Image (tube, helix red, strand yellow):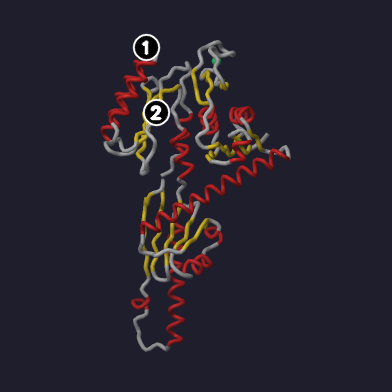
Amino acid sequence: MDLEPLIRELSNYYDKDSQNTFVSVYFNKQDDAKFLEKRESTCSSLLSKEEADFFNQTMEIINEVLKKEKGKTIAVFASSKHDLLRSVTLPLSLHNSLVVDTSPYIRPLARIQDEYEDYTLIVLDSHQARIYTISLGSIEHEKRLSEDIMNKHKKGGWSQQRFARLRKGAIQDFYKEVIEHIDTHETEQIVLAGPGTAKQHFSEQLPKHLQEKIIASFDVDIDDEEQVLSSSLSKMKDYEQQEADDLVQRIKAEVLTDGLGVYGLEETLAAAQQGKIDVLVIEKDYKLKGCVCEHCQLIKSGPIKDCPICGGPTSEADVIEEIIEFAERTGATIEFTKHDELHNLGHIGALLRFK
Ligand SMILES: [Zn+2]
């Protein structure tokens, strides 16, 4: 499941009057009824009269959706004022939250999208293969292929040599069949697993465009599905960490040569607002209190009561969330990472498309 289209769509919504009229709910298995009740009453008591009316209408809509998807982990984004309702059920666990704001709260969704990239997991030996499509950390699709040399070559009385030659040919045919199957569906990343040398021989037969997509391979008992899946997830995690490390190094190199890199809040925010960001990198869990005037799309760190441009009201905001929204609207990729160097660079940075 690709969350990107939903995240991008949500990033385009905001309340031009800077009213808190968007409600975002992230609810893990919906197993804590008190959480929602408590957040509902807290929020509705803090909102202005007009906002509270919108909030109550919006919560009615949201509660309908929750009822329909009872027991499932879900994210819901709604606003009665803006006629918005989007929801997605997720096959993973998340932190419960209910946020009322001037725009949908997309950061947790963006983090999930970053942390659980889809990949193809191929587990094989010389006569059987399982091809899994892994989405958001779970098996979305599975295909089993197997070759049976004895059925293909029933005639007996072979010499050892002839048998070995036929056997080799049959394995190659089998690998070809697996490759054809992989080639039919889109995949960006491949993890290869299985016992012994089969995966090595298999990867040598892969055409170059598929070979380049292999990000890890490891030994595993082909029948231990749980182990296969969890090992592949941890390989993906290592790979993503490595990607984030490389990204921070690339940003540093670009900044040093006065190239297409920025870091720190001011520069990154400006680049986001100008639609220049190709890849945005953010320190995990870093938040910064600030204000937004949705009317002017003005963002400032620290508190300001009225917008210096239009004089209208501002709304409290997490500046990082606002940068994420800008970046999403202009099609940037977003990476979250725990990284000392990024911390020292000001918690945030970006590679730019242009300057
Ligand atoms: Zn303004």
Q: Between residues 229 and 173, which one lies in front from this camera angle? A: 229
Q: Is residue 157 above or below residue 67?
A: below
Residue type (three-letter) at the residue carrying disc 1: Lys
In the image, ligand 1 is in what quadrant? top right
- Residue at 53 percent across and 51 percent down: it is 239
Is disc 1 surrounded by few (<14), some (14 to 19) or many (20+) residues within 10 Å? few
In which quarter of the view is residue 278 placed?
Answer: top right
| Left or right: 176 as drawn, with respect to 343 | left
Q: Between residues 331 and 317, which one lies in front from this camera angle? A: 317
Locate residue 232, reporting x and y percent. 44, 55
Q: Between residues 346 and 307, which one lies in front from this camera angle? A: 346
- Residue 86 is at least partly visible in this image: no
Disc 1: which residue: 49
Assign a secondary structure to mark 2: strand
Locate residue 332, reporting x and y percent. 55, 37
Residue type (three-letter) at the residue carrying disc 2: Ser
- Residue at 42 percent across and 89 percent down: it is 159
Disc 2: which residue: 24
- Residue at 57 percent across and 45 percent down: it is 244
Q: Quadrant of the N terminus?
A: top left
In which quarter of the view is residue 327 placed?
Answer: top right
